[in-house]
Amino acid sequence: MLVPVILAGGVGSRLWPLSREHYPKQFIPLIDEKLSLMQTTIQRLAGVPGILSPMIVCNEDHRFMVAEQLRKLEVESPTIILEPAAKNTAPADALAALKALAINEKAILLVLPADHLIRDNRAFHQAIAIGKKQAIKERLVTFGVTPTGAETGYGYIRSEKPTGIPNEIDDGALSVAEFVEKPNLTDAQRFVASGDYYWNSGMFMFTAKAYLEELGKFAPDILQACENSFRGIQQDLDFDRVDAQAFKACRSESIDYAVMEHTGKAVMVPLNTDWNDVGAWDAIWDVTQQDELANVAIGDVIVENVRNSYLRAESRMIAAVGIDNLVVVETADAILVADRNQVQQVKAVVDRLKRQSRREVTEHTQVFRPWGSYESIVNAHRFQAKRIIVNPGASLSLQLHHHRAEHWVVVKGCALVTRGEEEFRLNEDESTYIPIGMKHRLMNPGIIPLEIIEVQTGSYLGEDDIVRFDDKYGRKS
């Protein structure tokens, strides 16, 4: 029983302004035009012998986004575990292990971050086969990527070679001498030249039982908190909710610090393929096809005498002249301009936005909901206009507002409207008015997306002015 565990709880702040808290990088088609990084991670597993449906561990705010992306891949019977708070990888892996162990005491977990890029699936599958043999022997497997250069943005794993040859355990796995933090450039060059070091990929394989036993030895407080939280697990629609209070009491720790650096059962399987954690804009530039001047241009982009640059337009045209080695990323409400060699500092910008409580750090102008999305077009004193898209068969909650009225105009598709005691259809170019305090619901009964323009008027237009009476997605006011 091989269970892929996809860790999808990250924020990806170094890829701002495209990646934001409510729409982080793992759910964005950054490399593939259609598939998100999480979707490509799941597709990469196709053909692995004995692999089961994935288990996703994600932030509660992203649950419907995860479910929708799994639906589009036609994934059957996935498990989606909701983290009440971000506590790093050791607790996330513990929740997955507890869930898998409750189903099968011999379950083997293949733990994968949702946001990595691997293009050679064959080499990846070969490494998984080697790792599985080790996991069956109750070893804790980490995957080390054969380095192609002196990278300072990755951690490293050193494998001992006392006689000048790889210190193999058996079946292609190597012993682990130590885990090394992200080095400076001089140390990174020394690591690569020695041939003893591998990039730490953050991917693991082990039996659920072995991981929990080692976690109990070296981080018993984390195991106890996760067990307490798991005992309160409840099914909510398609999601597994653990006890929030118990989980929030858990300390935040990575699996490397909590277990792998201490256990005597660690082994490493070399992964000889192109691998990238696409953690910053220079990495995106590096793995995307470039033109003859080493530029990547995505969207409505015009360049003149531009070299070595990444330019991405999401909503408007970008025109660039005479620049070199820059990253320019445009969204509807923010523009990033950065030296390609300093894109790691984007996180400092995000931290500053957080301190200022800026909305741009959390969400885009287009906000995704389980039923579709809405996008603010105009926002002014006492009125705003939105473009609302409702997916086929989806509906908003039955709700009312205390401080705003709404005017709806259907521009595409067909709407089924509940307005007080009435229920009626609206076709294209038809409209209706929802007074303050009136119960209402919007539904798409059709087979194409419903698009409406909504004009709100009133003294307060915040999203928290919603009183829900019925919601198919289990949301509360």
Image: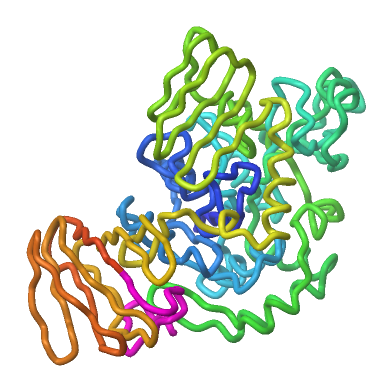
Report if residue 377 lies within the magenta region.
Answer: no
Specify the quadrant of the image occupied by residue 412: bottom left
Residue 64 percent across, percent down from the top left = 41, 65
Image quarter hosting the C terminus:
bottom left
Q: Nearer the viewer, residue 365 or 232?
A: 365
Q: Residue at x 75, y 67 (%)?
A: 213
Q: Residue at x 39, y 84 (%)?
A: 403
- Front residue of 160 and 114: 114
Residue 182: x and y, percent?
82, 38
Magenta stretch? 456-477
Dividing the picture into quadrants, the one containing residue 400 is bottom left
Name the residue rendered at 56%, 65% in the picture.
Answer: 59
Residue 280 image point, x, y percent: 64, 36
User: Count the marks: how many?
Assistant: 0
What secondary structure do most residues of the magenta stretch adopt?
loop
Using residue 108 as the reference point, say whether residue 168 is left or right of it: right
* Above/below status of 373 relative to 278: below
Figure colour scheme: rainbow
Left or right: 414 in relation to 246? left
Q: Position of residue 427 (x, y in %)?
A: 7, 64
Foreground residue, 282 or 342? Answer: 342
Examine the image and state in which quarter residue 87 appears: bottom right
Q: Is residue 178 left or right of residue 129?
A: right
Task: Examine the rendered structure and indicate whether residue 122 appears above or below residue 93.
Answer: above
Q: In percent of the image, x 63 and y 28: which residue is there? A: 282
Q: Is residue 263 visible?
A: yes
Does any portion of residue 48 appear in the rendered image? no
